[in-house]
């Protein structure tokens, strides 16, 4: 961790992996090297499809990378009956049994989806994204996704339908293979907190400014950062605007497009 907007990393784990605790912003190399490297990592964008013109409809999604549990956000979601899609890693589940139990106690609100086993980006090659070593090859990518899905199956009794990459980035040529194996790509159209790195006021403003059909991503694993307070304020603002909240498993979405 060194630069503003980038995630904090935890190095030296048992697996020898550097694991980000949040989903960061787009790395510069992905944006600039696309022409030179057509398989440079992409950050897919999805939106809600068929949004009625007379309603403001938003899909809230939260990532549980490694890290802890932000009860500030979870409490508001539960007390205000706001549904959300929660992307969870096995690492987070292992470290936050009480948080997981709270989410599982509200199946009417929370859909639990797959954020991978060890929070390893599904990216080919020998590179890092925000300091996180990528999977490197297809077998490692398959393991990351399949082991994450099995952990969710064990915890919830249902197989996840959606998979969201650690860091949000994928190798483009891998995306069709992930889809062919049965997982939908958990993209988004608005990053509310930029990896839980933004001050609260900016997070709240970004959420309040969401357009109908947006799929918002924020983080549920950083209870000590100011961003979470911004998410709470953003939720309140969206509520005041009469927003209808939907989960990804209850909505139609546009096909992912690569950004
Ligand atoms: Zn993540």
Image: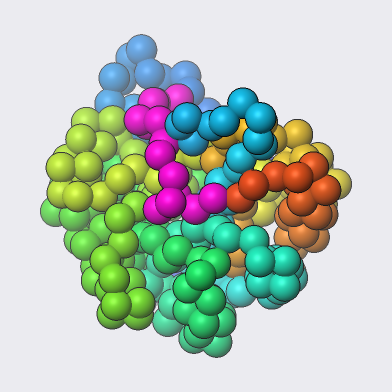
Q: Residue at x 29, y 35 (%)?
A: 171
Scheme of image coloration: rainbow
Q: Position of residue 9 (x, y in %)?
A: 54, 59
In the rendered image, residue 130, in percent from the top left (x then y), is placed at 50, 46
Figure quadrant of residue 236: bottom right
Task: Say left or right for 213 vs 119.
Answer: right
Say left or right for 59 vs 45. right
Closest to the observer, 243 or 112: 243
The one of 133 and 91 positioned closer to us in this rendering: 91
- At a point 19% along the width and 50% down the height, the residue shown is 182
State yes or no: residue 258 in magenta: yes
**Residue 2 in magenta?**
no
Q: Nearer the viewer, residue 49 or 196?
A: 49
Q: Residue furthest top?
A: 35
Q: Which residues are magenta?
A: 246-259
In the rendered image, the vertical position of residue 244 relative to residue 73, given as above or below: above
Question: Could you tell me how many numbered marks the image carries?
Answer: 0
Residue ID at (52%, 82%): 105
Q: Is residue 150 left or right of residue 63?
A: left
| Residue 19 seen anywhere in this rendered image of the structure | no
Residue 81 locus on image (x, y percent): 66, 66
**Residue name at image x 40 percent, y 30 percent:** 254
**Relative height, residue 70 to residue 235 (above, below):** below
Q: Position of residue 210 (x, y in %)?
A: 69, 35
Where does the C terminus fall, quadrant-wise? top left
Q: Is residue 228 visible?
A: yes
């Amino acid at each position: 961790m060194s630069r503003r907007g980038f995630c904090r990393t935890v190095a030296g784990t048992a697996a020898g992996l550097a694991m980000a605790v949040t989903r960061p912003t787009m790395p510069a190399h992905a944006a600039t090297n696309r022409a030179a490297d057509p398989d440079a990592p992409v950050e897919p964008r999805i939106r809600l499809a068929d949004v009625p013109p007379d309603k403001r409809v938003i899909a809230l999604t939260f990532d549980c990378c490694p890290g802890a549990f932000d009860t500030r956000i979870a409490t508001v979601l539960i007390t205000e009956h706001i549904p959300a899609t929660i992307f969870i890693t096995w690492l987070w589940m292992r470290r936050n049994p009480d948080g997981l139990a709270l989410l599982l106690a509200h199946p009417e609100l929370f859909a639990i989806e797959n954020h991978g086993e060890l929070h390893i980006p599904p990216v080919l090659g020998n590179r890092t994204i925000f300091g996180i070593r990528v999977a490197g090859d297809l077998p490692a990518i398959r393991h990351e996704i399949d082991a994450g899905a099995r952990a969710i199956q064990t915890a919830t009794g249902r197989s996840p339908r959606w998979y969201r990459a650690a860091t949000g980035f994928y190798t483009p040529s891998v995306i069709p293979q992930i889809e062919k194996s049965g997982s939908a790509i958990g993209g988004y159209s608005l990053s509310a907190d930029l990896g839980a790195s933004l001050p609260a006021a900016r997070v709240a403003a970004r959420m309040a400014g969401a357009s109908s059909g947006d799929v918002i991503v924020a983080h549920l694993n950083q209870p000590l950062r100011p961003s979470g307070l911004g998410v709470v304020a953003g939720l309140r603002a969206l509520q005041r605007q009469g927003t209808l909240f939907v989960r990804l498993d209850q909505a139609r979405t546009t096909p992912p497009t690569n950004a």
